[in-house]
Image: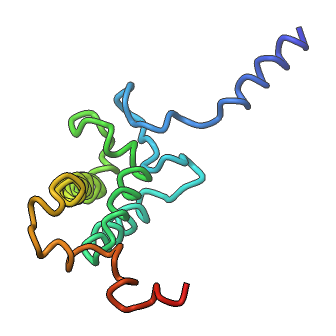
Amino acid sequence: MERRGGEERRDEESHPRPRAHGGGGGGGGGWPTVDGPLGLAAEESAEHARSFFLWGFALLPFLWAVNCLYFWPVLRSPPSSSPSSFAPIRPYVVRSAIGFAIFVVLLSSWALTFAIGGERLFGPVWNNLVMYNVADKLGLTGWM
């Protein structure tokens, strides 16, 4: 009997945390960050999500991706079933996801335009746009 009680206690100790997403049951509040109870409290999470979102506009759009990944439980839970503690965080995380998606589309289209189009698309201006001939333009290759 003692052994059985020890097993039960060990089982309880091995799963002390609630699930990271707030889904499932109606009552409990899930953790707003992916690292669960080790991460930020719900009060601090709103300020951090807002900071990541605003700094993403400062030509750091990868912070939008960090915001989405760090607050993944907020982004993943549907608004109707998410805990009320997610309400102040959710707009920043959703907007970060939209901003990062737009950034990825723009960056990919720009890269593909240069990779596929090249000199055929840009004509003689292409030689001024590319960076692989900078050393030739500046005369830095003659010493080799």
Where is residue 58 drawn, in percent x and y? Answer: 28, 78
Judge by depth and name the residue closer to the eye, 94 or 17.
94
Where is residue 56 drawn, in percent x and y? Answer: 30, 70
Relative side of 68 to 94, left or right: right
Judge by depth and name the residue closer to the eye, 44 or 133.
133
Judge by depth and name the residue closer to the eye, 17 or 69.
69
Q: Residue furthest top?
A: 1
Q: Residue at x 9, y 60 (%)?
A: 121
Q: Quadrant of the N terminus?
A: top right
Q: How many labels sit on residues?
A: 0
Chosen colour scheme: rainbow
Relative side of 45 to 39, left or right: left
Q: Is residue 11 above or below residue 84?
A: above
Where is residue 14 drawn, in percent x and y? Answer: 72, 30
Where is residue 12 drawn, in percent x and y? Answer: 70, 26
Q: Residue at x 26, y 56 (%)?
A: 100
Which image quarter: residue 75? top left
Q: Quadrant of the C terminus?
A: bottom right
Which image quarter: residue 47? bottom left
Relative side of 92 to 17, left or right: left
Q: Residue at x 49, y 46 (%)?
A: 34
Relative side of 34 to 10, left or right: left
Judge by depth and name the residue closer to the eye, 105 or 27.
105
Q: Is residue 99 above or below residue 36?
A: below
Q: Residue at x 90, y 13 (%)?
A: 3
Q: Is residue 42 above or below residue 126?
A: above
